[in-house]
Amino acid sequence: MQIRMEAARELLRSTELKSFEIAEQVGFAEPNYFSFCFKKHIGVSPKEYRKQASQKANEGSIR
């Protein structure tokens, strides 16, 4: 499961794929179950994770 979550994190940071597309790519048939597992393991939803990663990237490019 940890490998799937790491792959999902990378895809959320580096692509604009929809959450359900990322779910499929990391081996989840059900997008809702992917979101549930992601939040359980990472602590935030995929949408919130992408938002946070984007904000951090933008802060880094300003400096």
Image (tube, helix red, strand yellow):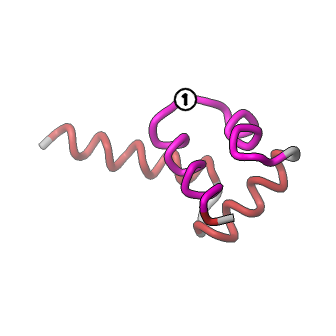
**Label 1 element class:** loop
Residue 38, image x, y percentages: 67, 60
Q: Is residue 27 magenta?
A: yes
Q: Main secondary structure of the magenta part?
A: helix
Residue displayed at 67% across by 39% down: 22
In the rendered image, the quadrant that contains the C terminus is top left
Residue in the picture at 54% in, 40% down: 11
Left or right of residue 37: residue 44:
left
Residue 40, image x, y percentages: 69, 70
Q: At x 49% / y 46%, what residue is drawn?
A: 10
Q: Residues within 10 Å of mark 1 (few under 14, many from 20)?
A: few
Name above or below for residue 6 compared with residue 23.
below
- Closer to the camera, 31 or 25? 25
In x, y percent, where is residue 2? 62, 65
**Magenta segment:** 3-28
| Residue 6 picture quarter | bottom right
Name the residue tied to disc 1: 16
Type of amino acid under label 1: Glu
